[in-house]
Image (cartoon, coloured by chain):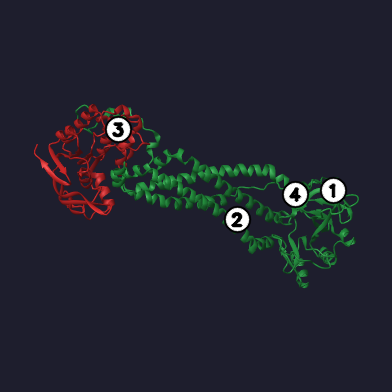
Amino acid sequence: MLDLSSVSRKYLVGDSDVWALRDATLHVADGDFVSIAGPSGSGKSTLLQIIGLLDRPTSGTVSLDGQDLAGFDDEQRARLRLATIGFIFQRFHLLSDMTALENVALPMEAAGVQADQRYDRASLLLDDVGLSQRLLFMPAQLSGGQRQRVAIARALANDPRLILADEPTGELHSEDKANIIDLFQRLNAQGRTVVVVTHDPEVASAARRRIEIRDGFVTEVAV
Amino acid sequence: MDGESIGAPNPGLESRTKRPWLLGFPFPIRSAARRWRGMLGMVVGVGFALGLVLTMMGLIGTSMGQVLGDFGLSGANMYVAVNGGRLVVLKGTDNPGTIDHATAVLSKIRSLPGVQSAVGQLSWSMKQESEGPQARNQPTQFIPAVAVDGDPNEMANRVVMREGRWLRRGNEVVLGPSLSAIKKIKVGDSLRMNGQTYEVVGIGKLRGFGPSGDSVAYLDARALRQRGITGDIVNYIAVQTSDPRAVRSYVEDLASLRAVSSDELTMEITSSSDFSSAIATYWLIDLFILFVAGMFVSNMLARSVAERRLEFGTLRAIGVPSRSILLSVAAEALFIILASYAFGVVVSLALGTATNAWLAPVYGYGQLFGVDPGTYLAILGVSLGMGLIAGFLPARGATKVDPLEVLREA
């Protein structure tokens, strides 16, 4: 599904170049559950952002279903993200003035789904993540675990093939964490590809493939 | 979280979900509608500015309309003046010109076939004096006066009396309502001017006298001539006739005079450069106010966009097209303008009603403010244009938010 070939990414910090990723090559197949682990500043988030089409590599190629994405402009990348990728962020990033239902329905609205259909599906998704009684709650009225479950429901809104999560349990208590790990495993069991960046061994161990990243170098760890 | 497939149909759930009505609207409208509290200050500020603009236009439109409409209402259908003279004095430098040998000209015009009435008018200035001995170093006060030759009551709708009656004798004066209010002189009072005491017999005005008809003292022209205060002159002659061609024919023979119908006179006023520049000046003032309001809206929207960077970054990250983000800011600008306009209309109607209730009577007008739908629509159009321009830069800024940068900062 997703191929990274000799991908490097450098940032200019002050007057010097800092390499966040060095010559990374990675193949993510349909149905994979991949964890990316590593210490802070190792390049995990950069790798996830390149996989998620939010960032562009300094060198190397990124292709999705065999198509090189180098020539895609920002709008084409946004469309691809909308249709193919579901993002889950460490700090949830729910829109604070919208209800849980509306937050989940928003990506469907952007994709042109009719109002009745999108709110019905948003209700279903929130029910699936255990929030059927919280549809019209504002994010501020929800606990951290509930907010992350809304974020997961939002990530699933357009039925994406690839779920990308950046430290999804970083702000959660242990019980909420277990629920989220369970959700990822269920999603993967249904055939969705899941890539999770984490420094939490518990989350990493739930994945079927483990990637470690250190000083920008990517290595696969045998499970 | 029951272990079933995520996103599988669940028919029972839909019926439990009562969707708020707002969710039926597209995201840009919902987003703008939700932010109404934050926009309230802006709406009030811009609304007041628009209210002032609308009130000013309502006042200008009405007073211009009154000046022009006054000619239409007056029974006079012809005006005779000297060539090159300005019949309606719009500014201080306008010179109405003088018709010499006024008694003879008036007499001739009155004898023409079809003429029902002819009234000569001369703008003059009288020195106001107090009764009894004059104190030394007493400041001199002048009263703008109009010497009237003939009986305007013979002309339909020429005289508008609010109180008392029109002049019958040479020692009587009729005061314009505004002059009466300013000088605090009532019917029955006496007024000493140029060494003669005049009895105030009425408060009223002559129609078709331009914008200053309410603030002058009307006196008998023949009496003034006899006392040597004025010569045998008038500025113009208003004529009510059923045969305008006879008047034109007579005037053409006199070469120095010209005759215009009331329609031609209205046209002459509205097409004059003074009239156009007065209107243009008011529009320029309005546009300046709108420009300042636009800058205010633009700055506030830019601040709002800066505060919503995380929201826009998140939307871009999940793949929401930049068009939707652009529209959400544009909708906010539109919302502000429409709400401000509605508020502005309320402000202008309140100010206009207050002006008509309290100020108009003081100046002797029936009304000073009126609603012209065309002007209100024009201001709405200009305001919408201003809103779009004001919202453009902030909206474009919102689409340029880099999701990567924002999410990294968060």
Alpha carbons under labels 4 and 1: distance apart: 16 Å
Q: Position of residue A92 (x, y in %)?
A: 29, 36
Q: In what quadrant of the picture does the C terminus of chain B appear?
A: top left
Do callouts 2 and 1 mark residues in contact (Cβ within 8 Å)?
no
Residue at horizontal 62 percent and vertical 43 percent from the top = B351
Circle 1 sits on which residue? B201
At label 3, counting other C-alpha atoms closer than 10 Å, the crowd grade (few under 14, some 14-19, many 20 or more) is: many
* 3 and 4 marks on the same chain: no
Q: How many marks?
A: 4
Instruction: Report whether residue B168 is seen.
Output: no
Q: Quadrant of the N terminus of chain B?
A: top left
Q: Which is more N-terminal, label 1 or label 2?
A: 1
Relative height, residue A148 to residue B275 (above, below): above
**Badge 1 vs badge 3, beta-carbon distance below 8 Å:** no
Q: CA distance from mark 1 to mark 3?
A: 85 Å
Which chain is in green here? B
Q: CA distance from mark 4 to mark 2?
A: 24 Å
